[in-house]
Image: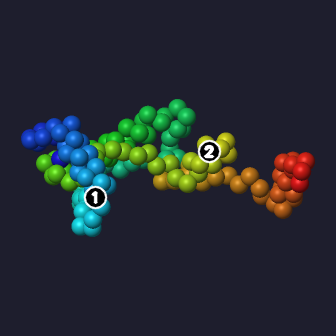
Amino acid sequence: MNSPAEGSTRSLSEHVGRVVARRRAFYAARTPGHFLVNVHFPVETPAIPPLHVFDLDHQLTAWLDHNLAAARPIWEAKAGLDDDTLPAICPRFGIAEHSAWLGAEVHLQETTCLPVPVLATPADLIAFVRAHAQPFM
């Protein structure tokens, strides 16, 4: 069971407790033959609007709400199924989230983001190297 959906016989906290216990046993096992089961099956979910329609500096919560709304039908469909999945969402911004963290400019796309190149020409590389040259080099 992955959500406290109506009619479920176990609460979310009971499910989480069971999954945590099974995962601990799995990772503590020293012999082959142990496994965890994460069931995936098709479920109709609301579409998540493209990243580029949001100003994530001001609308991050709205974008996360769309992600949550898309995840809930999956959790509800799995109510009563005692697999090893824990209900969670993980915001995925794309590969450039690392670039943004380092202060680089990024462009949001439909489902990902792309970094804006810092170096556009060979001359840019030479200028970059000179600007960041170490005295011992």
As rendered, which of 13 and 117 lies closer to the eye? Answer: 13
What residue sits 56% from the left and 48% below the top?
97
The image position of residue 41, as x and y in percent, is 24, 60
Q: Nearer the viewer, mark 2 or mark 1?
A: 1
Quadrant for the C terminus, please: bottom right
Q: Which residue is mark 2?
A: 100
The residue at the far top in this view is 58
Q: Amino acid at mark 1?
A: Ala
- Tag 2, which secondary structure? helix
**Residue 132: percent from the left, percent from the top?**
84, 48
Task: Please identify the residue farthest to the bottom as the structure is shown.
Answer: 32
Question: In the rendered image, is residue 3 in sight?
Answer: no
Q: Which mark is residue 91?
A: none
Residue indicated by mark 1? 29
Depth check: 84 or 39 in front? 84
Would you say 99 lies left or right of 136 here?
left
Query: Quick check: 76 left or right of 125?
Result: left
Is disc 1 surrounded by few (<14), some (14 to 19) or many (20+) residues within 10 Å? few
* x, y percent for residue 136: 89, 51
